């Protein structure tokens, strides 16, 4: 499966706050937060479901993978989504190991696996 997704009873806002704290413990920061609902509504489109896209990065890890293979930049920063679906909050991400398959480099695959495990742990810590 190319993604990892979990469900929680927490609100989107609470999940966001807890996720940011969990990411900081792993030295990942949120570079950008995109509120899809707000942007679509701003453009006059009806979309009432909370849906946030976070771009997250650990600068040390970014430097490490880019030094190994600059093609990895096509997949940076990592994305995590938080959204509401049928009254439940879901948190998910595309798996770095799935994305990195497009770069034929075993060392990068190992690095992506480590980053993936750490991001999944950050998500799991808050559910």
Image: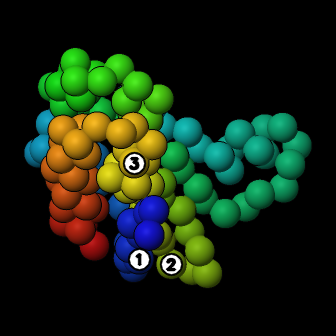
Left/right of residue 108 with respect to residue 39 in the rendered view: left
Rendering coords of residue 103 (x, y %): 39, 37
Q: How much space separates mark 1 and mark 3, taking CA atoms?
A: 27 Å
Mark 1 surroundings: few (<14), some (14-19) or many (≥20) residues within 10 A: some
Task: Say what secondary structure mark 1 lies in.
Answer: strand
Task: Say what secondary structure mark 2 lies in.
Answer: strand
Mark 1 or mark 3: name the one nearer the start of the chain: 1
Q: Is residue 59 visible?
A: no
Camera-side residue of 53 and 11: 53
Which residue position is annotated with label 1? 7
Q: How much space separates mark 3 and mark 2, taking CA atoms?
A: 31 Å
Which residue position is annotated with label 3? 101
| Residue plotted at (57% across, 80% down) | 87
Left/right of residue 21 with respect to residue 1 in the rendered view: left
Is the Cβ of the residue at disc 2 closer than 8 Å to that at disc 1?
yes
Left/right of residue 45 with respect to residue 40 in the rendered view: right
Camera-side residue of 9 and 117: 117
Q: Is residue 95 above or below residue 124?
A: above
Placement of the N terminus among the 4 image quadrants: bottom left
Placement of the C terminus among the 4 image quadrants: bottom left
Which residue position is annotated with label 2? 88
């Amino acid at each position: 499966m190319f993604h990892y997704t979990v469900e929680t009873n927490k609100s989107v806002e609470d999940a966001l706050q807890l996720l940011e704290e969990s990411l900081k413990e792993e030295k990942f920061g949120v570079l950008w937060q995109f509120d899809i609902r707000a942007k679509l509504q701003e453009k006059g489109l009806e979309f009432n479901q909370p849906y946030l896209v976070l771009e997250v990065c650990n600068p040390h890890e970014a430097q490490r993978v880019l030094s190994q293979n600059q093609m990895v930049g096509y997949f940076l920063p990592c994305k995590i989504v938080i959204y509401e679906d049928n009254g439940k909050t879901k948190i998910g991400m595309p798996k770095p190991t799935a994305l990195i398959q497009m770069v034929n480099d075993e060392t990068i695959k190992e690095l992506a696996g480590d980053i993936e495990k750490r991001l999944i742990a950050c998500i799991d810590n808050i559910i």
